[in-house]
Image (cartoon, helix red, strand yellow):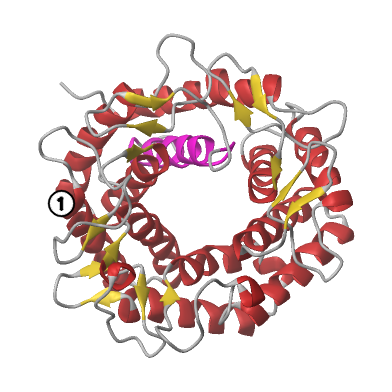
Amino acid sequence: MPKSLPELADEYRRELLDQVVPFWEQYSLDRVHGGYFTCLRPDGRVFDTDKFVWLQARQVWTFATLHRRVDAGRGWLEVARHGADFLERYGRAPMGGWYFSLTQAGEPLVVPYNIFSDCFAAQAFGQLYQATGEERYGTLARETFTAILARRDTPKGQWSKAIAGTRPLKNFALPMILCNLALEIESLLEPEMVQRLTDECLREVMTVFLDEETGLLLEDVHPDGSRSDSFEGRLLNPGHAIEAMWFVMDLAERRRDTELLHRAKDLTLRTLEYSWDTEHGGVFYFLDRLGQPPQQLEWDQKLWWVHLETLIALLKGYHHTGDARCLEWFHRVHDYTWKHFRDSEQGGEWYGYLNRRGEVLLDLKGGKWKGCYHVPRALVQCWWELDELGGRR
């Protein structure tokens, strides 16, 4: 029999406060050079010392958020400052963009080709500004956000590998993130800009990238919104689609737009039904909209962030619409996620990568792409949603 909502809320809260956050506090802080180690084995040992700017920024955001919204008395603000100081000193290139990666001591390794370093830097310093009121953090967030908007039509700029004009494509990830980022740093922006930007992002996410034939969200379309019959143009990324839907639900709640809430909930369920592995359980990483073989060899892996974002979206969908299918799916995804990704032996942070059968593929707790972000964010979000659904918030 499934646990009650209050019991589940307590489970998520304990996992956050007693296991996951202490793991990163104990093992990730570089006390010599500053910043955070993210390449960590199950027992917390560091296996690589390179520092990836978007993961540094994500961890700053996580601890600043925990300080602001969970408990201001646990020293989490100092953990956030620890990473922010390192980013301020070393993370930004002379031309203003944020590097992709640095050495342990802060020397640049990879140029600022990836606009998501900038997105998460803006998010981190915006959250830190709200936590401290210190203007330098607000200035950094605002300047970075302005630069993102200037680059959004050509996010990789001179570092793009594609030949210009042959097969121009725009990607789903940036409007998806901007939906959330604009609200994260809203206090630093003009209200008209926030309204205009969120309107544009909602149109892109819910209309331009929506494939009417399948009712699913595509990862890439032509700049005019037309479909591309190519690997990229047929690509589905269920995790991106579902994560975007809870961003949209937050916007819809803010706007009191009941129709939009139901559309986002329905898209969540449709994506989940299409991408669930009926043989082994779990959500596939990549799929092709026409059922063709995807180009990604890792298409059938099961990833931590995909399942965690799904849990958030399902709870928000149930909370805002009362659709019982959301709660039924939540229990199913919860059981799979906690059984396979959570480290029941050593505790701490969760595993990130499983094979199709649900077996741990890489026994790391953090690496180049996985840091202190999706697990704690999802635990917080689910804890709060479950508390509210159970009548305790």
Question: In this view of the protein, which residue sits in the foreground, 153 or 113?
Answer: 113
Q: Residue furthest left?
A: 279
**Horizontal relation, residue 44 to residue 180: left or right:** right
Residue drawn where x is 82% and y is 62% of the image: 93
Mostly what secondary structure, the magenta segment? helix
The quadrant holding residue 155 is bottom right
- Marker count (numbered): 1
The quadrant holding residue 2 is top left
Residue drawn where x is 81% and y is 63% of the image: 140
Residue drawn where x is 89% and y is 50% of the image: 89
Above or below: residue 166 compared with residue 285? below
What secondary structure is marked by label 1?
A: helix
Question: Is 259 included in the stretch rendered in magenta?
Answer: no
Which amino acid, mark 1? Glu
The stretch of residues the image draws in magenta is 371-390
The quadrant holding residue 280 is top left
Above or below: residue 289 compared with residue 155? above
Q: Which residue is mark 1?
A: 273
Q: Position of residue 327 (x, y in %)?
A: 21, 42
Quarter of the image with the C terminus is: top left
Q: Position of residue 306 (x, y in %)?
A: 36, 45
Question: In this view of the protein, which residue sits in the foreground, 74 or 239?
Answer: 239
**Horizontal relation, residue 109 to residue 206: left or right:** right
Quarter of the image with the N terminus is: top left
Question: In this view of the protein, which residue sits in the foreground, 321 or 182?
Answer: 182
